């Protein structure tokens, strides 16, 4: 390798490694089926596997561990940020709803206010990605939450992949919640949400941030949609319980790779997983 | 950054990116709970997230897609190799059992013989990792398959993580199988295995290669153990149906991160997933 090539390689390597959600190096993201093979590998996305990859949904722990009360933060937000600029989750001790949008992380506490998040704060459960829209739609008709989800479903290339969904819209009504910090011994999530604060917004503009996970990852993530909300001025929001949308712009990011990091100590080790927690899930989500 | 630091960084970056399963850079793998935080992040393993990471179980597609007959190869072995030197799976068209050990990939066909694998061959489903033993045990007592699995279970730090398991042993009996290449329209796996070839080995030395997946990933991977076998001279083997082991050396690799890449076109898009395929799984595995 001559000196010039050497430095070009150095620069490329540096870009790959220091970027959190930088765009791919050279290769634009491709839509499914347009690649040479019928497998759009993460390498093809241009930035190696893992950190900062645009088509990877990165997750900390599992939804069932959270349902069972594993609330101790295990990953600092400073590290979570390297895996995504967009996502949802919660914080150490189940203290509030996490929402990440355009690279900014927010903590929505029980007063409904969206607070900035420091890199030292930790999460017991979060799902993030580097958001790059693969499909965009305009929704002009009013829609409630079920109708919005049905509209999104109609536009999915497959129900068997993961998707990140962003909706910048005008809402006549949004019902959202946040959960207070829990104390040990931690209650199960279905019990913890009995102390949740519920906020109602009327005639508000803002952004829905969330994911659609396939049915077959039940136990790992929430099958179907899981959405959080933040107002257009990024001042308030919460975990979405219900909504009436007037109109909005919908973006879907197809995330065909799923990267889950599990806690390597603490409550996660001994919690009973693998049970059917469907009833708990319904109590918690809606 | 001065010139010296600059070159040190360059060298580190190069090692990180070109390695498939190279050992970690500087940081030896740590046992759970010994890290500063209670989360042994992949970064801490020394080689960034993804490709070649020592504590990542890398998977192509899902077990339920395979059970439903999605057999078209979607990832070349040349790429799979960058994610692991150890693992199991199958090949395009369900042609034989895949086994990877010490960086060598084998295809065990219906004659029971282990053939070398070329990088152009593709897989519809495989699970690999860069194997580095976290725990080693010597088993001196004879054990059948259930007893071996129970012994392994007794030595797991948690049932909620993924593990790679390697057993170099002497076996009084091993019953293994392989499956012939299927033609389209592909039958379901439970039907395809009705044409399997079964091999019986007696008084043979060799290696069991496989994984233990937690119960909560049912639908994604095989809950519990999934083992393939290859003889000590690496000439024959198959998917393990039954065994009687005299003694052996057992190694467990704790893989706390799980990276799943899904096909972005082909049969995977439209196959019905999320059903309970437990009955099919039992028919296929044992």
Image (spheres, coloured by chain):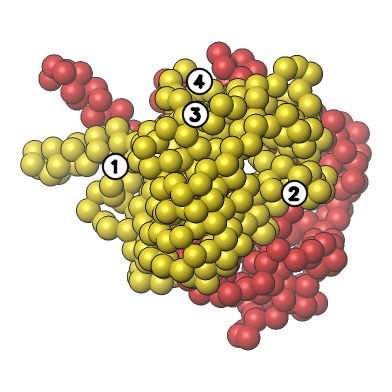
Chain colours: A red, B yellow
Residue holding disc 2: B282
- Count residues near mark 2 (Cα–Cα under 10 Å), then give few for <14, some for 14-19, many for 20+: few
Q: Position of residue B154 (x, y in %)?
A: 52, 72
Residue holding disc 3: B113
**Please, what secondary structure does the residue beneath circle 4 have?**
loop
Estimate the spatial distance between the alpha carbons at disc 4 and disc 3, rounded to whole Å: 17 Å
Q: Earlier in the sequence, mark 1 or mark 2?
A: 1
Both labels 1 and 2 in a single chain: yes
- Quadrant (top left/top right/bottom left/bottom right) for the N terminus of chain A: top left
Query: Which chain does the numbered disc 3 sit on?
Result: B
- Count residues near mark 1 (Cα–Cα under 10 Å), then give few for <14, some for 14-19, many for 20+: some
Do the residues under discs 1 and 2 have CB atoms within 8 angstroms? no
Query: Which chain does the numbered disc 1 sit on?
Result: B
Please indicate, yes or no, whether residue A15 appears anywhere in the rendered image: yes
Both labels 1 and 4 in a single chain: yes
**Please, what secondary structure does the residue beneath circle 1 have?**
loop
């Amino acid at each position: 390798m001559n000196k010039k090539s050497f430095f070009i390689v150095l620069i490329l390597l540096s870009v790959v490694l220091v970027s959190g959600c930088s765009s791919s190096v050279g290769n634009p993201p491709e839509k499914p089926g347009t690649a040479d093979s019928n497998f759009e590998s993460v390498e093809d996305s241009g930035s190696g596997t893992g950190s900062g990859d645009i088509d990877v949904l990165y997750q900390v722990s599992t939804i069932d561990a959270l349902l069972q009360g594993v609330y101790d933060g295990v990953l600092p937000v400073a590290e979570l940020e390297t895996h995504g600029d967009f996502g949802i989750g919660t914080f150490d001790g189940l203290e509030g709803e996490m929402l990440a949008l355009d690279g900014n992380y927010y903590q929505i506490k029980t007063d409904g206010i969206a607070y900035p998040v420091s890199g030292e704060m930790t999460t017991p459960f979060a799902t993030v990605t580097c958001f790059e829209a693969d499909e965009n739609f305009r929704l002009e008709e009013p829609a409630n939450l079920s109708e919005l989800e049905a509209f999104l479903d109609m536009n999915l290339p497959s129900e068997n992949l993961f998707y990140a969904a962003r909706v910048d819209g005008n809402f006549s009504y949004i019902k959202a919640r946040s959960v207070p910090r829990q104390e040990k011994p931690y209650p199960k999530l279905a019990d913890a949400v009995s102390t949740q604060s519920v906020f109602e917004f009327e005639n508000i503009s803002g952004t829905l941030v969330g994911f659609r996970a396939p049915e077959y990852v039940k136990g790992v993530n929430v099958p179907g949609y899981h959405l959080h909300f933040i107002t257009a001025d990024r001042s308030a929001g919460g975990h979405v319980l219900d909504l009436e949308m007037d109109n909005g712009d919908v973006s879907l990011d197809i995330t065909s790779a799923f990267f889950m990091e599990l806690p390597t100590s603490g409550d996660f080790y001994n919690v009973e997983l693998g049970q059917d927690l469907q009833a708990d899930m319904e109590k918690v989500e809606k």
